[in-house]
Structure formats: C-alpha cells, structure tokens
Amino acid sequence: MKKVQLITDGACLGNPGPGGWACVLRYGDLNKEMFGSERETTNNRMELQAAVEGLRALKERCEVVVVTDSNYVKNGITKWIQNWKRNGWRTSDKKPVVNQDLWLELDTQNARHNTTWEWTKGHSSHADNNRCDELATSAARSQSSSD
C-alpha cells in the first residue's frame, strides 16, 4: 500500500467571508499542491474541505498521514464523529452537527484509506503547513478581489 502524507489548511477573510482551502500531497519524491475557494464560507468549512479534497484526490487505497493545524478537524474525525453518527448527527447537547455535509464527505473519504491524523501548530515551523496557509489565503483573497 502506498504511503502518502497529506498536509491541509483552510483560511477565511472574515468568518464568515471569502475562504480558501489548500493541501499538499507527498508520495516519495512526488509533490502535488491543490487549492480552491468559496465566496462566502467559514474557516472550519475550509479546513474540512482541504482534507476532503486531498483524500478524494487519491485514486487508490493508501496509508495516509493527514497533518492539520485544525483541532476541530482532527478531533471531529478521530473522536466526535462516531457519537454524532450514533446520535443521528446531533451533538451531545442535541443540536444538529454544524457542517454535517462536509463531515459526511470526510467520513466517506477517510474510510477509503488507512489514515492517521496528526495536529501541527499553525503558522509555525511546518513548511508544508505554511505553504498550505499561503495557498489557502491566496485563494480566499482571489474571491475577495472578485467582488
């Protein structure tokens, strides 16, 4: 099974506001950067979208280490999601799970692979996370400047 590293980040200019997501996929010496944007979104949605798009881009089952600076994404997919599913996509205080559409898609993409989720401090010493931040912020700005 191929071993891949997926580094992700999301950005938003205002929250909500114009947003961008980005990811870097690494496999051996290969490196692929991906990014996109939405006109009106939230930072959490962009963080989720980055992970979804990165996992979706993998055409076969892989062993994937996903590196994110979002505890929301990491904890959601590794700790909270099983309870949300068991509770009919409701939180522990019986409210609907926010961003359910993206959580459902992330759950689907995550299940296609053997994943390990790691957190890294944002805006710190992780070069690929910093690159994702640059790409996501640039993508968000492209939405902002198209008004």
Image: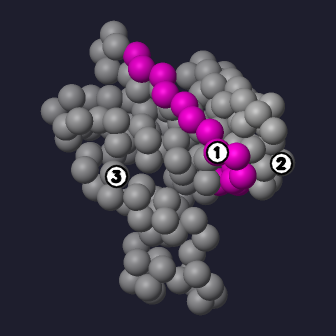
The residue carrying pointer 3 sits among few (fewer than 14), some (14 to 19) or many (20 or more) residues within 10 Å by Cα, namely many
Please give the count of numbered marks on the rendered protein: 3
* Picture residue at 44% right of the left edge, 41% below the top: 53
Residue 110 bears which disc, if any? 3
Spatial separation of the CA atoms under disc 1 and disc 3: 23 Å
Q: Quadrant of the C terminus?
A: top right
Identify the image quadrant of residue 63: top left
Looking at the image, residue 44 lies above or below residue 21: below
Numbered disc in front, either 1 or 3: 1
Looking at the rendered structure, the secondary structure element under dot 1 is: strand
Q: Which residue is drawn at 34% across and 36% down?
A: 57
Q: Earlier in the sequence, mark 1 or mark 3?
A: 1
Q: Which amino acid does label 1 sit on?
A: Glu
Q: What residue type is labelled 3?
A: Asn
| Residue 35 falls within the magenta-colored stretch | yes
- Label 2 packing within 10 angstroms: few (<14), some (14-19), many (20+): few
Q: Indicate the secondary structure of the residue bearing disc 3.
A: helix
Where residue 117 appears, as percent x and y from the top left, is 44, 45
Question: Which residue is labeled 2 in the image?
Answer: 14
For label 1, the residue is: 38
Residue 11 seen anywhere in this rendered image of the structure? no
Magenta-drawn segment = 31-44
Q: Is residue 10 magenta?
A: no
Mark 1 vs 2, N-terminal side: 2
Residue 142 screen position, x and y as percent:
72, 30
Q: Which residue sits at x=59%, y=89%?
A: 94
